[in-house]
Structure formats: C-alpha cells, structure tokens
Amino acid sequence: MRTLNVGHSPDADDLFMYYAIAFGWVSDGAIHLESCALDIETLNCKALEGALDISAISFGVYPLLAQEQCLLRTGVSFGNGYGPKLIKLKGKALKKNFKVALSGAHTTNAMLFRIAYPQARIVYKNFLEIENAVLSGEVDAGVLIHESILTFDERLEVEREIWDIWCDLNKQGLPLPLGGMCIRRSLPLSTAIVCEEMLTKAVKVALENKPLLSKMLEERNLIRVDSKKLETYLNLYANEDSITLNQTQLNAINALFKIGYDSKIYTQILNAEDCLIPLEYRDFRNS
C-alpha cells in the first residue's frame, strides 16, 4: 500500500470533508491517505515547495504553482454572499495607510484586499491570532477567516466584507473562490485519479452522515465552535457545492485568475479547466 500525505487546515470545513477517510469510512486497497493539519498559509507555502502530495490551498495561490500541481475538483469552499470579513474596533476610523493583519500573503482574501487597499500596511499572522491583534491595538484592522467570521468579539465591527470587494472586481455575480485542493503532477496519473475519487467520496459520505460526523468531531475536541455554529459554518463552506466543481465555480476561478493577471499579481492567465486531472485517461486506459 502506498502512503500519500494530505494537507488540510484545522478549520471545521476541511476537517469535515476529510475525516470520512481518517475514520475509515472511505478507503482504497492500494493507497493510504495520511493527514497533516496546518494553517492555510503554511499549506500554500508547502504546496509552492512541493512538500505535500495533496494539499488544501487558497485558489489565489494556484497560478504560482500550476506548473507543478493539478487542481482537484473536490473539497472546494466558495463564498456566496459571504466570506472573510475586514474587522476593526467599533467606532474606529481607518486611515488610508491603516495597519492590517492578514492570514497569509498567498490567501485569496489577501490578494483581493491588496487590490482594494493598496496603501494599507500589512502584517501577516496565523488566522487564530488576528482578532486579538485588533483588540490589543497592535493593528488597526484584520481580516477574519474560517469560523472566526461567526464568533468575533462584540467590541469589534465589520468595516467591509471581502465578498463586496470581490463583487466590485468581478461584476458577474459569481461565487467567491476561497479554498480548493491540488495534487502533485509528478504522481502517476492513475494514482492521482484514484486520490481524487477517494477525496470526492469522502465529501459525499460526510454530507450523507453530517450529524454523526459532526458529533464525532466535537467529541474529539477537533472543532473550535459549538454544535449550532458548526452547523451554520458547514452550511456555508462544506455543502453540496463542495463535492465537485461545477461550471459556475470554474467561471469564478477563471475570473479570479484574470483579476490577478490584470493586477500584475500573475504573469499569465490560466483556464481552470486546463488545470484539472484529465479523467479521460482512465477511460482510455480501461478501453
């Protein structure tokens, strides 16, 4: 049996979508997937280094690693009317060059933030440290991600939604591409196809057994929010649209890539469909 490592973040939606494999509900006789839980920016950097076989990533980083990694169709998280939030102390006025804490240079929210606020002074922190940095006055504002968008301190208020920045930039009413998954191109294509099938099945099984899996994750203290907030959060980011990319989501990813190119963040425009694992290989091989 071949063991491959899978990087995912410790936030609830990634855990939920992966843990059907960890609990043995989804398996393959030839491949064992072993998890590695790291914050999203660390995962982005490891994907750039090629340090993991499979990894959750921010869609915003993908054009920088497209030569070495394929996009997977599954385990995706999009915002649709919601997403990361730029927060500040209530009543605080922000200057043009306000100091802000972001969760990582390669995250989608950081890319969109930099386009919208070119004069802001950015520091990067682990996403779990951002709220306290704002409360303490270390920074003027911060962008909250993951479960933090549901649970931030009552002394804070939302200055702007990253969703609104996205809508201003894409002007097409498309969902906001936040997180996806990638796999090393150096793996055999047949192996990559099996891995994508396993991960896709894991998301399906998780959704089919949502109450049970949620309870098991809570009992093991893997979740940072209570059961009510967990359900709300999963409805946002781990839902039927997370199983496999649809055409609207592909259009949204392409819009993100074009925005990045137009803003000189990327040196070329990618078509997301060209970056997916070619499933026709499986049919050709078995014909």
Image (cartoon, rainbow, N blue to C red):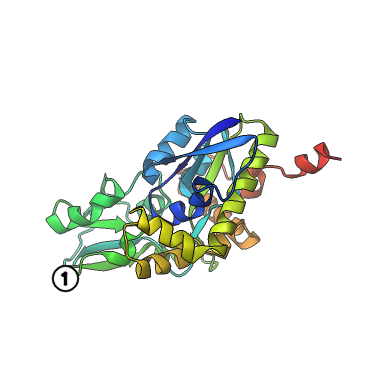
The residue at the point 29 percent across, 46 percent down is 126
In the image, taking residue 210 as reference, residue 37 lies left or right, namely: left
Q: Residues within 10 Å of mark 1 (few under 14, many from 20)?
A: few
Q: Which quadrant is the N terminus positioned in? A: top right
For residue 38, above or below residue 87? above
Q: Looking at the image, which residue is at 55% across and 42% down?
A: 182
Q: Residue 121 in the image: x percent, y percent?
A: 24, 48
Coordinates of residue 229 in the picture (x, y in percent)? 36, 68
Is 155 located above or below residue 144 in the figure?
A: below
Q: Which of 169 and 200 is in front in this view?
A: 200
**Which one is nearer the viewer's eye here, 194 or 276?**
194
Residue furthest out toward the right: 287
Circle 1 SS class? loop
Q: Which of 280 and 232 is in front in this view?
A: 232
Q: Is residue 10 visible?
A: yes
Amino acid at dot 1: Gly
Quadrant assignment for the C terminus: top right
Residue identifier under label 1: 91
Q: Where does the image place residue 234, in percent across and percent down from the top left?
A: 45, 64
